[in-house]
Amino acid sequence: MKRSGIGLRECTLRPFLFPTRIILLILGLHIYKPLSTPQNDLILRVAHGEHTEHTPVWLMRQAGRILPEYRAVRASLSGFKELVETPEKAAEVTIQPVDILGVDAAIIFSDILVIPEAMGLPYQMIEKRGPHFEHTISSEADFDRIRVADASDLGYVYEAIKHTLDGLGGRVPLIGFAGAPFTILCYMVEGSGSKTFSKARKMLVQRPDLAHKLMGMITESTVTYLRAQIGAGVHMVQVFDSWAGILSPADYRSFCIPYLKTICDALEGTVPVTLFAKGAHYSYADLAALSCNTVGVDWNTPPEAAREAVGMNRTLQGNLDPAALYGNGKEIVKATTDMLRAFGKHRHIANLGHGVYPDTSPDNVKIFIDTVKSFQHE
């Protein structure tokens, strides 16, 4: 099943700006100049390896979850998906953490599952249960349902980027993102969240040909999508491999690293790229060998071990345990300063080791952020 649309498949090896700009013009969007320097550019300078006056800080899942202001916006709509697909509202909740928490970067409010939907596999977000796909990919015949996504399928995301940049007014950088191919495959094969993603892992073992075929389609769709986000004006991008930790080191090198390499190579020379492979500490050296700028570190990996694996030519991001923000003020300050000392003053972006938990107090998050911003390395 192939829908009509403006495709970029024939352009994936060409410079990204020309085809992306054509698509954005057709979508009626204002074209922002990539790499326009925000007033607060700490995170960009650190990603490029420069020394800065203090460590930059932001949080994964900061756009939403913990803020009552976010919940008020979401309550005015039918649910999560409508919020994702309504550019003005997505921009509003993207900017909230900048105004309320004082983070050094915004990350566009969206979802990693917009890619499978753009590929022809729609999903629902069920309250208190998470994502659900009516159809999944389990055999060769299922590939008739999907295609490589066009950039035009995700115009609402680029429109949200436009509104967000208008609202930020050049104050801080805007981060774009996408799910890593393996993590997206997990949902497309499993059909929902899972502790083991056993159906996806079964495909890797019994039908590696199908797994590689699907990963290739996801990768091509993701390159197109991230290029279009960059063309719309984001200052850096992050690729989330949320389920990397369920794979063995050998499987990760076989089924993940080659596709992440394709993405990094396609984006090289554009904006800084962060790779975050949750639970896959064994992959850090392999990730650092790719043309990325930053490697995300989860809270299960000591900063010293991450630095040894990655080396001094890549920035590290992380890695406070999200549960540390359940502590009292003194405990949060100590945990944060211990983390900052462990990473040191060179090439570190402060963050949590994964997304902030939804029942975390915004006041505690603010303590974390203020501690980072006031900390001075010796």
Image (spheres, rainbow, N blue to C red):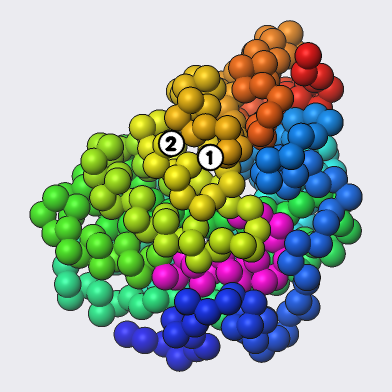
Q: Is residue 72 left or right of residue 308?
A: right
The answer to the question of whether label 1 and label 2 lie on touching residues, with beta carbons closer than 8 A, is yes
Q: Residue at x 24, y 44 (%)?
A: 251
Look at 56% across and 61% down and name the residue there: 268
* Point 25% across, 37% down: residue: 248
> Quick check: 151 above or below 102?
below
Q: Specify whether 194 is left or right of 228.
A: left
Q: Quadrant of residue 184?
A: bottom left
Is residue 234 in the magenta section?
yes
- Where does the magenta region start and end? 220-237
Local packing at callout 2 (Cα closer than 10 Å; few below 14, some 14-19, many 20+) is: many
Picture coordinates of residue 35, whole percent (x, y): 75, 62
Point out the image quarter for the N terminus: bottom left
Q: Amino acid at mark 2?
A: Tyr
Residue of label 2? 284
Q: Give the residue at x 69% y 10%.
A: 334
Determine the secondary structure under disc 1.
strand
x then y, percent, for residue 117: 44, 69
Q: Earlier in the sequence, mark 1 or mark 2?
A: 2
Any part of residue 64 in sight: yes
> Tag 1: Cα neighbours inside 10 Å, few (<14), some, or many (≥20)?
many
The residue under label 1 is: 295
Q: Amino acid at mark 1?
A: Val
